[in-house]
Image (cartoon, rainbow, N blue to C red):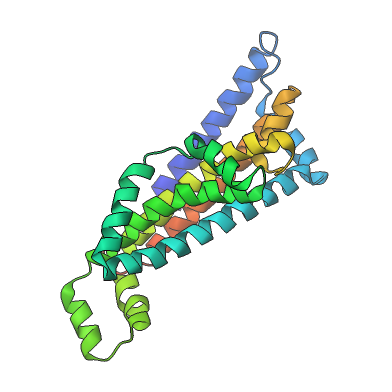
């Protein structure tokens, strides 16, 4: 275990202890703030009755569906952009216009298009993920040395072989950065959207779980949902770190 991981664990332990002590000391001033031990107990109960487990499952299914759809669509569009300059110019213009827009800002338009259902959340994730992934793909592919393209053409690679064997591995540092950034955007958009869409009970994921229990002042449940969101985020970051260590760091591209 390296020093960085040990430091992170120590900081986490200190934060938990501070939470427990402060919540206990000031419980008579603000009884709505539960102690960490209360949250853990409630989390165990919610997992035992499968409520929190189901909410986590719904959120993960939705975010993975939107995430995988977005990165696949961005890959196809980026390949077309590389081949046709006018397509690239068109999507770069759209990127400049739409990428800065927060997902919640286009929520009314998505509601008009798809209605109050899971498809609308996937469209929201699509907006969050597609644009940074498209930029990462295009930057990565255009940074591949021309000699690689010429060499793959000389030895008879098909277009599919060029991208799977030459372009994607060469552009992988940019692609991995885009994947990591896009995941964070998609996860945040999902939780925000679920809290809004969940008002109708259409999607009962973690965002709806937190919204529902906040309405009834079940703050232990609210903090339990927040902790699950943090755990999923940390696990995703750990997964990206493993991919990074076994790819671009292992290849010597970065230290």
Q: Nearer the viewer, residue 117 or 161?
A: 117
Quarter of the figure with the C terminus: bottom left
Q: Nearer the viewer, residue 14 or 60?
A: 60
- Count of residue discs: 0
Image height check: is 32 above or below 251?
above
What percent of the width, then of the height, locates residue 185? 46, 45
x, y percent for residue 69: 52, 61
Q: Residue at x 37, y 51 (%)?
A: 132
Q: Could you tell me which residue is drawn at 63 percent across and 42 percent down?
A: 228
- Closer to us: 63 or 102: 102
Query: Which of 119 and 213 lies nearest the eye of the viewer?
Result: 119
Q: Is residue 51 left or right of residue 194?
A: right
The picture places residue 80, in percent across and down from the top left corner, at 34, 68
- Compared across the picture, whether 87 is left or right of 240 comes to left
Quadrant housing residue 249: bottom left
Q: Write the residue at 69% across / 37% down.
A: 198
Reply above or below: 104 against 163: above
Please identify the quarter of the rendering in which residue 46 is found: top right
Asked whether residue 236 appears in the rendered view, the answer is yes
Residue 180 in view of the camera: no
Q: Residue furthest bottom?
A: 155
Q: Vertically, is 20 above or below 250?
A: above
């Amino acid at each position: 275990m390296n020093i960085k991981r040990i430091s992170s664990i120590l900081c986490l332990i200190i934060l938990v202890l501070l939470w427990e002590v402060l919540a206990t000391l000031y419980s008579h001033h603000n009884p709505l703030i539960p102690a960490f031990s209360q949250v853990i107990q409630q989390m165990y109960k919610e997992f035992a009755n499968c409520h929190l487990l189901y909410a986590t499952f719904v959120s993960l299914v939705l975010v993975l569906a939107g995430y995988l759809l977005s990165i696949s669509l961005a890959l196809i569009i980026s390949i077309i952009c590389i081949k046709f300059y006018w397509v690239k110019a068109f999507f770069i213009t759209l990127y400049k216009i739409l990428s800065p827009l927060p997902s919640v800002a286009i929520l009314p338009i998505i509601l008009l298009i798809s209605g109050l259902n899971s498809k609308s959340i996937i469209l929201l994730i699509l907006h969050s993920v597609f644009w940074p992934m498209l930029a990462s793909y295009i930057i990565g592919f255009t940074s591949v040395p021309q000699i690689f393209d010429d060499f793959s053409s000389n030895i008879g690679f098909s277009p599919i072989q060029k991208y799977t064997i030459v372009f994607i591995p060469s552009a992988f540092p940019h692609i991995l950065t885009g994947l990591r950034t896009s995941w964070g955007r998609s996860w945040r958009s999902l939780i925000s959207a679920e809290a809004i869409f969940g008002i109708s009970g259409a999607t009962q994921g973690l965002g709806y779980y937190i919204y529902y229990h906040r309405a009834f002042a079940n703050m232990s449940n609210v903090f339990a949902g927040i902790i699950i969101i943090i755990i999923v985020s940390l696990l995703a970051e750990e997964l990206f770190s493993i991919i990074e260590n076994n790819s671009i760091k292992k290849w010597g591209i970065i230290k």
